[in-house]
Amino acid sequence: MPMTYSDLIADVRKSIATVSLEEIKRRLDEKVPMVLVDVREKEETRAGFIPGAIIVPRGFLEMQIEQKITDKNAPVVLYCAGGTRSALAAKTLMDLGYTKVESANPGFVRWKDLGFPMEKAPELTDAQRDRYSRHLLLPEVGEAGQAKLLGSKVLLLGAGGLGSPAALYLAAAGVGTLGLVDGDVVDASNLQRQILHATSRVGMPKVDSAESTIRDLNPDVKVVKYQERVNSSNVERIFKDYDVIVDGCDNFPTRYLVNDASVWMKKPVVHGSIFRFDGQVTTFHPAAGGPCYRCLYPEPPPPHLAPSCQEAGVLGILPGVIGVIQATEAIKLLLGKGAPLVGRLVTYDSLRMKFGELKLRRDKSCPVCGDNPTIKEYIDYEGFCSVDLG
Ligand SMILES: [Zn+2]
């Protein structure tokens, strides 16, 4: 005769070990090693879960548990809302060869009533879950990573050739705050490469034009506008709130100021530069062991040797490639995933369609990040052209 549901549950309960909520709380407080597994549905866990628990809904248990708990002798405590699903899950884990399995009795509903500690997953709205669904499918991003991006702040120096593609992709990715520093207005000759802007906005400040594009692309993103040039008196005010600096400026005074400020304020700078058909990207982050810009070029060249102030030609698509690599690096730094371009310079030759990589080393005698720094105050270098090659 087939079993009824109550027979089945009664059988399961006899064959598994249970543990009280008070005992789980004691183990948490005393940091007793255990793997807590929440087997409720994803929707149920949104209102909170026991701190440190991993979430494996009952329906995915058999498929996922061996990836999540590789040691079959690890002490595992399962819980659900009331204690039934976790009892069934405990039986399954025992069948799969796990040796130290317990089921909480009762479950999370009572845990909450008791006022025991809870953790909450960062909340995304339904619209955000839809917008970022392709990110949520990546375990390296997921809801927690997406929430991190939404809480992150990236400063873009320049809303030009490099800043345009970087800003567009960072906005699309849901980086919650984008700071834009650019003192210029949109010029028709920018539109060959500066894809944030539009013909209808020629003459408008670039920061305003950029803001309108970004707002239309993704209303989750807050744009903070700085319609000014970075100098020694404003650099710390502008930099202080940001997690990552994306540098698309190509003039010496700014480059050295940005470097010195970022070293002192311990902010990573994703640096990009372009010239004609060639581009380069690296991440300056001495706090992570890499060099700073002055490790490579301690002082700017004397004005008569500096590159000519004539505007240089540039293939319009080139900053697209380099700016998108910069945005990729910024996202990786924000998520803490992958290997950043710290101590590495990626080179790109669009005519030969070749990428290369050079090692960059930190210089212990660097005047800013070295062991005995000689530069301790901002220097406003003068006498250079400030043509933004981007
Ligand atoms: Zn240095």
Image (cartoon, rainbow, N blue to C red):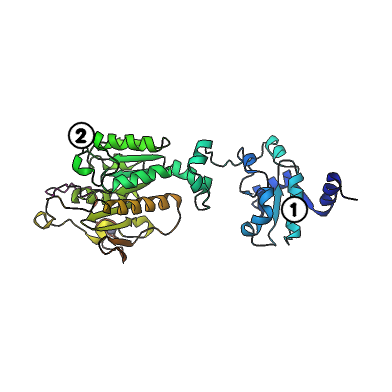
Q: Residue at x 19, y 57 (%)?
A: 299
Q: Which residue position is annotated with label 2? A: 203
Graded by Cα atoms within 10 Å as few (under 14), some (14 to 19) or many (20 or more), the crowding at tag 2 reads few
Q: Earlier in the sequence, mark 2 or mark 1?
A: 1
Q: Quadrant of ligand 1?
A: bottom left
Taking the magenta stretch, the answer to whether it contains residue 109 is no
On screen, residue 295 versus residue 51, left or right, reads left
Q: Is residue 218 above or below residue 327?
A: above
Q: As shown in the figure, which amino acid type bears the numbered disc 1?
A: Ala
Q: Which residue position is annotated with label 1? A: 90
Considering depth in this image, is 8 or 359 the residue closer to the camera? 8
Taking the magenta stretch, the answer to whether it contains residue 386 is yes
Please give the count of numbered marks on the rendered protein: 2
Q: Residue at x 78, y 50 (%)?
A: 18
Q: As shown in the figure, which amino acid type bears the numbered disc 2?
A: Gly
Image coordinates of residue 57 in percent, x first then y, are 66, 48
Please give the range of residues in magenta.
Answer: 378-390
Image coordinates of residue 383 in percent, x first then y, are 11, 48
On screen, residue 299 versus residue 130, left or right, reads left
On screen, residue 15 versus residue 227, left or right, reads right
SS category of the residue bearing label 2: loop
**Which disc, if any, is residue 36?**
none
Image coordinates of residue 79 in percent, x first then y, are 71, 46
Magenta part, dominant SS: loop
Q: Is residue 356 above or below residue 134?
A: below
SS category of the residue bearing label 1: helix
Considering depth in this image, is 17 or 377 the residue closer to the camera? 17
